[in-house]
């Protein structure tokens, strides 16, 4: 089986190399045969997908068949591993996850190459660039991180098993989502570089790649938050984001990708920021590769990085090649990126996008800086330092607050110029609403003067209220105008409004999701926790809850042994739930894992962890966290997904309408 | 709760030490330094008189309240300091968030932290002791000394530079002259009009 896999990988490398070289020659050489050569290169690119898929299928089959002759399967699977996790074996280790990278890249390449008729020459350029990236990953798989390497000596009877932390349902979804995001940025990168190389006229390439970018961004968002939810549910420390280098690696391309999604509108609408957008998408792709490098090189220590290996050098070389290529073509063709319009006013949508981009990039820089500072410190002063949550929270929270403010103000600004009166008119009621929110919160007992974290929390909620009110007012104002013309009720009018301009109103829904998440983050200031040894009938009180230990017991199955407690939860003297926090001991890997019992409500999470047993008394040690508003984070992610889907739906009504009708309809796009 | 080990007696003791040292400083100011043995008995008399003054009583009351508040803040201090340090077992978690039962380090480190707070060591001294014992990586964030200051300055510096740059760019773009063709006021028709309409649509659409 390993021979089939190895052969498939070699064949995939040959095909992608042909797709790259053949495609390149077809673009460079002008002649009758170049079109045919280009077509064979495209087909080779299509075939690459089938062959990489075969290699991945072989690895998964090897996991299901317990083929421990393959070292990767021996290290990441075992006989008793449940079927879904055997499937997840594909991305649970270094070599397999690189194969998964290559598979997703070839899948994206397949879609791109099948849609080549949209613009044959642009797609041919993009196909060559994607083939070059494929060549890199297939070289890595064939010569540096071979997933089909065989075990030396006698065959082991069983494997080491999958890391217990990865044996959780979300782990079957989280990595594919994250990788779809990481890998997906290759496509807009390829189109951007292709457009630069070709000196592609107009902004059509941006329109072509807009959906790619949004889909990719959506996947990355899902991946990042699924990771946060997994950490919250499995790691058992009561938090969802620890500013670990691996988490940071996923956040950086998300930040630059978000900046690109905003600033690209300036290029589409006004022909501005061409150079900026080009480098923004280059940076996003390079940060995706850099993130992969961070998690695999051992350059920074992390809870869930892959094992240290020599493949870090490959990534450094690849990053250098990408940067050099981008720089060379930028220097050569930068005259093509001249801006077409001038900025007319500081109070305009354009300037709000500029500041939005600045803040997103400062946040990205801060994350990158904090992640790499330990390495820099060791290099400069010979001692390594830790850069953990206190640093990231302190420097990033003010930036996030400024971003929230811009999220509130930006949609109220029109392109080109907005009058101060118009801004005042649109901003007054949301601002009053935000102030009232702040006053109410202080009246309810929030003390922003007590500590800077309380101040930040209050500001976050107030600014979130401001954003929510501006978004709602945009929908209501537009809905009313449509309602007046169609006689529909307000809700139906708002649905129609969103359908008329899905991108704009989908974007507002995404903004709404972001503020719901931010409110969830703000709740962290009020977190409480308590730890106690609990025997039969023992009680623990935290917040309004009382937990009573009904019993504690043990169980065993072929995959793991477990200990858990049965805790009755009372609130106001009434039993409201029974929770079973659990701790597992996985036999194959000889590692423990936590299964958190969480009672989640919109108000707060009662998060209960079975920490272990007191060896003397044999009684369980229970740690309880009371985490307010965490559910809002996950609800916010669903709202973001819904907004992204809305933004991807084509507009219901053709935009090109007769001039008089458009003039009447102009107030619908309030602020314009 | 492990971090809520209350030690009010110790905090009062610490506070009384603080009180007495402050009282001594008050005498030195009024009587001057370098007094002989006799002057110390005078100082004691002066101190007694000072204690009897209404203002002094108020100050003492305030200090006592402060001390008692300090007793209640013991766990808050442990909580604060424990969140400024990492567990050094390699789990990469904040000290008070390390949830490994039987972790070779976190239980011991927490106990040491509580003991340090009980002793009345100030925050800097407590952290310094941990750094000496466990190395610089025990701190969850870079200190604000030496080269580590760069870690804190850079993000703000980049933000300020970025804001300045964007402001300059906006100003430069605004002052860029608008290029108008000769006789530009002429009416537009056909494809050119369509182009302008298209641009207007773009400007007002999103």
Image (tube, coloured by chain):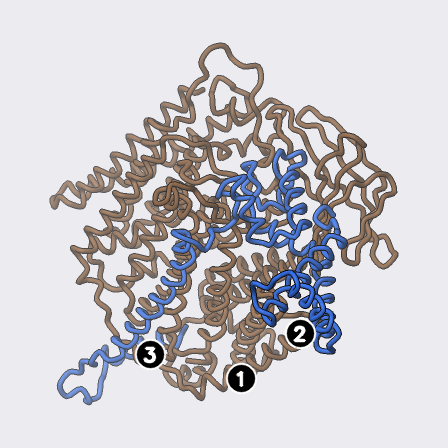
Chain colours: A brown, B blue
Q: Is residue A598 visible?
A: no
Q: Is residue A464 visible?
A: yes
Between marks 2 and 1 in the image, the one whose residue lies nearer the viewer? 2
For residue A163, which quarter of the picture? top right
Q: How many marks?
A: 3
Q: Callout 2: few (<14), some (14-19), or many (20+) C-alpha neighbours within 10 Å?
A: few
Farthest left residue?
Answer: A31
Marks 2/1: CA–CA distance = 21 Å
Marks 3/2: CA–CA distance = 46 Å
The chain carrying label 3 is B
Dot 3 corresponds to which residue?
A: B200
For residue A65, which quarter of the picture? top right
Dot 2 corresponds to which residue?
A: A442
Camera-side residue: B11 or A544?
Answer: B11
For residue B159, which quarter of the picture? bottom left
The chain carrying label 2 is A
Question: Is residue A69 left or right of A354 when viewed as pictured?
Answer: right
Dot 1 corresponds to which residue?
A: A428
> What kind of element bears circle 3?
helix
Q: Quadrant of the C terminus of chain B?
A: bottom left
- Tell me the residue at 84%/53% (across/down): A570
> What kind of element bears circle 1?
helix
Q: Quick check: marks 1 and 3 in contact, CB under 8 Å?
A: no
């Amino acid at each position: 089986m390993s021979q089939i896999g190895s052969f498939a990988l070699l064949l995939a490398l040959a095909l992608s190399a042909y797709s790259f070289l053949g495609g390149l020659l077809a673009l460079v050489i002008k002649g009758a045969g170049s079109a045919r050569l280009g077509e064979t290169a495209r087909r080779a690119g299509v075939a690459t997908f089938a062959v990489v898929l075969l290699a991945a299928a072989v690895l998964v089959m090897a996991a299901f068949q317990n083929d421990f002759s393959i070292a990767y399967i021996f290290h990441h699977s075992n006989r008793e591993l449940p079927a879904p996790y055997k499937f997840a074996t594909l991305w649970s280790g270094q070599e397999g996850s690189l194969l998964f990278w290559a598979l997703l890249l070839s899948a994206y390449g397949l879609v791109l190459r099948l849609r080549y008729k949209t613009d044959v020459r642009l797609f041919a350029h993009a196909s060559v660039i994607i083939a070059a990236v494929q060549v890199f990953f297939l070289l890595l798989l064939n010569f540096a991180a071979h997933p089909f390497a065989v075990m030396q000596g006698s065959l082991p009877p069983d494997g080491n098993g999958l890391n217990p932390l990865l044996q959780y349902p979300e782990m079957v979804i989280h990595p594919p989502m994250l990788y779809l995001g990481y890998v997906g940025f290759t496509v807009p990168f390829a189109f951007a570089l292709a457009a630069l190389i070709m000196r592609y006229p107009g902004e059509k390439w941006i329109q072509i790649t807009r959906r790619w970018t949004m889909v990719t961004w959506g996947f990355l968002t899902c991946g990042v938050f699924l990771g946060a939810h997994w950490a919250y549910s499995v790691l058992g420390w009561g938090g969802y984001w620890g500013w670990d280098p691996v988490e940071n690696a996923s956040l950086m391309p998300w930040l630059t990708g978000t900046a690109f999604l905003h600033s690209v509108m300036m290029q589409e609408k006004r022909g501005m920021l061409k150079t900026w957008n080009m480098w923004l998408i280059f940076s996003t792709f390079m940060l995706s590769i850099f993130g992969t490098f961070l998690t695999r090189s051992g350059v920074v220590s992390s809870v869930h990085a892959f094992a240290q290996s020599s493949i870090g050098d490959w990534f450094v070389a690849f990053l250098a090649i990408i940067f050099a290529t981008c720089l060379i073509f930028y220097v050569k063709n930068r005259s093509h990126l001249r801006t077409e319009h001038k900025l007319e006013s500081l109070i305009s949508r354009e300037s709000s996008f500029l500041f939005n981009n600045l803040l997103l990039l400062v946040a990205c820089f801060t994350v990158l800086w904090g992640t790499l500072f330990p390495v820099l410190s060791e290099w400069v002063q010979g001692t390594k330092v830790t850069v953990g949550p206190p640093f990231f929270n302190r420097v990033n929270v003010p930036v996030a607050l400024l971003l929230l403010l811009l999220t509130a103000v930006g949609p109220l600004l029109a392109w080109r110029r907005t009058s101060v009166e118009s801004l005042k008119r649109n901003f007054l009621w949301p601002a009053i609403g935000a102030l009232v929110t702040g006053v109410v919160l202080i009246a309810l007992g929030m003390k922003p003067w007590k500590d800077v974290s309380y101040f930040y929390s209050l500001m976050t909620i107030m600014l979130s209220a401001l954003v929510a009110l501006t978004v709602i007012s945009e929908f209501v104002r537009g809905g009313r105008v449509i309602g007046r013309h169609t006689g529909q009720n307000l809700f139906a009018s708002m649905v129609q409004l969103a359908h008329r301009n899905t991108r704009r109103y989908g974007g507002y829904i995404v903004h709404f999701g972001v503020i719901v998440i931010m409110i969830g983050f703000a709740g962290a200031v009020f977190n409480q926790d308590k730890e106690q040894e609990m025997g039969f009938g023992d009680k623990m009180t935290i917040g309004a809850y009382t937990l009573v230990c009904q019993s504690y017991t043990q169980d065993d199955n072929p995959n793991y042994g477990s200990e858990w407690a049965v805790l009755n939860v009372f609130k106001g003297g009434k039993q409201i739930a029974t929770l079973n926090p659990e701790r597992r001991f996985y036999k194959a890997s000889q590692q423990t894992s936590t299964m958190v019992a969480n009672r989640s409500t919109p108000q707060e999470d009662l998060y209960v962890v079975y920490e272990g047993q007191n060896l003397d008394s044999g009684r369980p040690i229970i740690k309880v966290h009371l985490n307010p508003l965490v559910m809002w984070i996950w609800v916010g992610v669903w709202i973001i997904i819904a907004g992204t889907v809305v933004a991807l739906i084509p507009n219901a009504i053709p935009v090109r309408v007769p001039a008089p009708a458009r003039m009447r309809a102009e107030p619908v796009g309030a602020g314009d | 709760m492990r971090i809520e080990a209350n030690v009010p007696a110790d905090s009062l003791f610490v506070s009384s030490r603080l009180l007495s040292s402050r009282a001594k400083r008050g005498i030195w100011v009024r009587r001057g330094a370098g007094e002989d043995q006799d002057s110390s008995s005078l100082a004691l008399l002066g101190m007694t008189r000072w204690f009897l003054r209404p203002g002094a009583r108020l100050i003492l009351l305030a200090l006592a309240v402060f001390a008692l508040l300090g007793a209640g803040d013991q766990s808050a201090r442990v909580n604060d300091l424990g969140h400024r340090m990492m567990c050094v077992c390699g789990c990469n978690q904040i000290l008070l968030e390390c949830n490994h039962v039987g972790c070779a380090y976190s239980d011991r480190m927490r106990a040491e932290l509580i003991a340090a707070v009980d002793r009345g060591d100030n925050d800097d001294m407590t952290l310094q002791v941990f750094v000496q014992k466990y190395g610089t990586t025990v701190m969850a964030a870079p200190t604000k000394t030496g080269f580590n200051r760069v870690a804190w300055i850079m993000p703000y510096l980049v933000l300020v530079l970025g804001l300045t740059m964007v402001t300059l760019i906006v100003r430069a773009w605004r002052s860029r002259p608008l290029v108008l063709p000769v006789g530009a006021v002429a009416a537009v028709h056909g494809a050119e009009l369509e182009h302008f309409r298209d641009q207007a649509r773009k400007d007002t659409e999103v």
